[in-house]
Image (cartoon, rainbow, N blue to C red):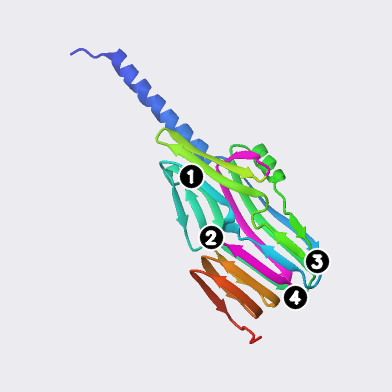
Amino acid sequence: MKINFLAMKKKWNWKFRLVSLLLCLFVFDNFGQVSEKTFVQEIEVNKNITITSNVPTSLDIELNTQHSNRNNTYNGYIVVGKNNQERLFVHKEYVIHTWEKNTIRQEVDIKIKSDSDANNQTFLNQLKIHFAKTNRQILVDANMNLEKFTMQNSRFRSDDCQIILQDGTTFSIDYLEIKTRLYIPKTANLKVNSILNHTLRLGDLEGNLDLNIQYGEVFGQKIKNLNANLHFCLLYTSDAADE
């Protein structure tokens, strides 16, 4: 019986290369660098200011993939790519606290994963909280200056995830997580606009509450004046005034 050692060597070399390639892909997907940062910004405002805000789920999502899943869960929007890897998690709950201060305070938790810590820090340094003033209004962007999340993949291509900022700057990432909180004066007027599913939680509000929401749940405590344009929404108030 003759044994073709050359053929066996080529066969095992091919298997070794395949296993090495798969191992490299596994390492790349699971051992990236993770960074976390909480952004905080405050601004002093007049007592009866009007505050207009979108919701965290207003981040645009664009997928061009063969292997992906966009999950609209109770807690948030989750985009899953190949090998069941989570690539995006936008917390759906938007908590708007009210307090006695004539101050607006926004807090945004960002968790980013990419191929290097340097890339993470460059990305985080590009983010900022910005309150836009127009006459007697303050415009609040719940996603800071994040504009769009895109992902592409195919049978022979791993997940290619990009974050695009409002100025057009693009970053390659492996994973992004966003969670937003807002603090406003209880005497302020509040407007919230949304066409995407979310959960809105409000504290006591003595000013006017104007809701223009198509999907979601709204939980309020003591709401004095309510003007609501709601479609496919649930509204809960624990103590609404008659006025």
> Is residue 161 at all visible to an observer of this figure?
yes
Residue under the point 48% across and 44% down: 63
| Residue span colored magenta | 167-196
CA–CA distance in space, label 3 to label 1: 40 Å
Residue 231 image offset from top left, x and y in percent? 51, 69
CA–CA distance in space, label 4 to label 3: 11 Å
CA–CA distance in space, label 3 to label 2: 29 Å
Residue 165 image offset from top left, x and y in percent? 65, 45
> Is residue 26 at all visible to an observer of this figure?
no
CA–CA distance in space, label 4 to label 2: 27 Å
* Kind of residue at disc 1: Leu
Name of the residue lying farthest toward the left: 1
Residue occupied by mark 1: 63
Residue 137 image offset from top left, x and y in percent? 75, 64
Which is more N-terminal, label 1 or label 4? Answer: 1
Quarter holding the C terminus is bottom right
Q: How many marks?
A: 4
Which is more N-terminal, label 2 or label 4? Answer: 4
Residue occupied by mark 4: 187
Residue occupied by mark 2: 196
Q: Main secondary structure of the magenta part?
A: strand
Compared with residue 1, is residue 149 higher up or lower down, i.e. above or below?
below
* Kind of residue at disc 2: Leu
Residue occupied by mark 3: 45
Left or right, 210 with reference to 104: left
